[in-house]
Image (spheres, coloured by chain):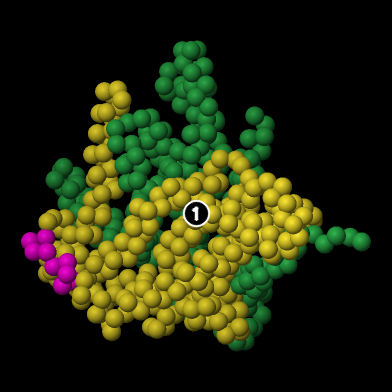
Chain colours: A yellow, B green
Amino acid sequence: MTRRQFWTGIAALVVSLFVFVVPFVFILFMAAKDKKEAARLEFNWPTEWHLWANLVEVIEARNYMLLLAYFNSTVITVGAVSLLVILSAMVGYILQRRHSRWNAVIWAGVMAGLMVPPAVVPTIWVLQNLGLFKTLHGMILIQVAYGLSFAILLFRSFISTIPRDLDEAAIVDGAKPLQIFFRVILPLLKPATVTIIVVQSIAIFNDFTNPLYYLPGKENVTVQLTLFNFQSQFVSQLNLLFMNILLITIPPLIVYIFFNRQIVAGMTSGAVKG
Amino acid sequence: MKRKSPYPYWFVFPAAVIFTTLFLVPSVASLWFSLTRWDLFTAEFIGLENFVQFFKEPFLVQGMTNTVIFAFVTSSLKTVLGLLLAVLLTSGIFAQGFLRILVFFPVLVSTIGVGITFTRLMHPTKGAINIALAQMGIDGPGWLTDPSLALFSVALVDVWKGVGLATLIYIAGLASIAPEYYEAARIDGATRLQQFWRVTVPLVRPATVTVITLSLIGGLRSFDIVWAMTKGGPGFSSDVLASVIYKQYQAGFYGLSTAGNVILFALVALIVIPLVSWMNRKEVDQ
């Protein structure tokens, strides 16, 4: 490392400290203050740390709404991501292995899914007619529908790196299509699968707009919506609002620490032509 | 006898059913419902009245122009800053890995949480940003209270949150440029700046196309950051189409809300499709 690289690095660190670290420290400080001090909005060290007391109060607020929200968000995230992985891997597999004019139709669907903004009220209308409006499984299916395109693209490009000889060998051994897919192909897709699990679960966990539209109702609250509900209730209790922000920031942080590499792989999959 | 394909089309079926019912059907239905006065149960055909209203009501028109402004401001800032940051973070500087982590982390954080945090940091009198500016002798503006500034303040926060993704995509793009190009440029006596403009910028093009496409589509559709920070206010000064759609939905004007959806789709299609095909064509030319 040259001298110049060292000092540029130091300068960049100082700047990013202000730009990228200060907001998070602000969240932490606010979450630790008492009600009066938090209302002053100052960026300073809390005179007394009330982290635990605030934590308990946020969890107990509105009859343990936050715990219910964590439960709901977990159910939606796990359900949607598992379905997404299996269904999109199957589509990506067919799209890559078989060539006919149906492929053009599938491609058109994938592209539409990436570009077209979902039509919200008509979607509510469809959900209502199917009896899925305001239900967790309806929300799961919505997240699957919206996440399919990205996952299919990723799986398709990954499957192109798996030699067809493997399928042929399995066919010769008398394997049925389902057996080939689940016994031979799916296990080999693990890197792409992990990437999709990580990226999509963060996206679904952080989703605000879709639950806002498709999952109204107190018993259906998700973590992002608690923030919104608390915002009106906690105008005078900013410490609790920020404790809530802190609590919903922690899961993505943990995932990021453990799956840094997969996130990077997933997010950049479209960058280099493949 | 024809052998059955080992890649049967019914594999696509479950995904296709979910996608069709919950995405395609509503999208197509929106074309019809946008022409109606609608309460979810009965739809009364009123022709293009909803669209006429969109282009006549000043606050709805403002929602449309704001959407375009917001998308272009955030997309161009993310593209430029993303490339510069990526170049910086691949140049072998001190603490490079740690800096990459810092820049990227906001991408993973809840947008609503970020919005609420910055709303407080941007408070006109008590917010940390204006207090810091005051200490440097600058009179900070009312970031979110000044109607002419609110939209740009929200855009700035959106860039803060999203620039990490652009940077990451550019880092991957830069890594795919063979070092021989830079060696050849150096031998020819190119300065660092010339290397940047003549080697990096043209060769990182696929990444640029990705960044612009993603950030434009995302920018045109932005809702949560606007909703968390200003709810479209003060007045309607920072309303975007997605927040107008939500407001009309809340007010029970389902037909009007759906017309907003159709306009949003038209906007995405009119801006993104020509741009992407133009960018891809130039790529083939080279």
Nearer-the-camera pick, B180 or B282: B180
Q: Position of residue A264 (x, y in %)?
A: 45, 47
Label 1 chain ID: A
Magenta stretch, residue numbers: A46-54
Classed neighbour count for the residue bearing mark 1: other residues with Cα under 10 Å, few (<14), some (14–19), many (≥20)? many
> Is residue B111 something one can see in this rendering?
yes
Residue depicted at x 37% and y 69%: A224
Q: Position of residue B107 (x, y in %)?
A: 39, 53
The residue positioned farthest toward the front in the image shown: A173
The residue positioned farthest toward the bottom in the image shown: B41
Nearer-the-camera pick, B265 or A271: A271
Q: Is residue A108 magenta?
A: no
Residue depicted at x 58% and y 54%: A189
Which quadrant of the figure contains the N terminus of chain A?
A: top left
- Rendering quarter of residue A88: bottom right
Which quadrant of the figure contains the C terminus of chain A?
A: top right
Q: Position of residue A247 (x, y in %)?
A: 29, 66
User: Compared with residue A158, is residue A67 higher up or lower down, i.e. above or below?
Assistant: below
- Rendering quarter of residue B224: bottom left
Q: Position of residue B87 (x, y in %)?
A: 41, 33
Residue depicted at x 24% and y 66%: A242
User: Compared with residue A158, is residue B28 higher up or lower down, i.e. above or below?
Assistant: below
Residue type for callout 1: Thr
Say whether residue B268 is left or right of residue A42.
right
> Is residue B74 something one can see in this rendering?
no
Q: Which residue is mark 1?
A: A195
The residue positioned farthest toward the left in the image shown: A47
> SS for tag 1?
helix
User: Compared with residue B78, is residue A132 higher up or lower down, i.e. above or below?
Assistant: below
The residue positioned farthest toward the right in the image shown: B1
User: Compared with residue B152, is residue B197 higher up or lower down, i.e. above or below?
Assistant: above
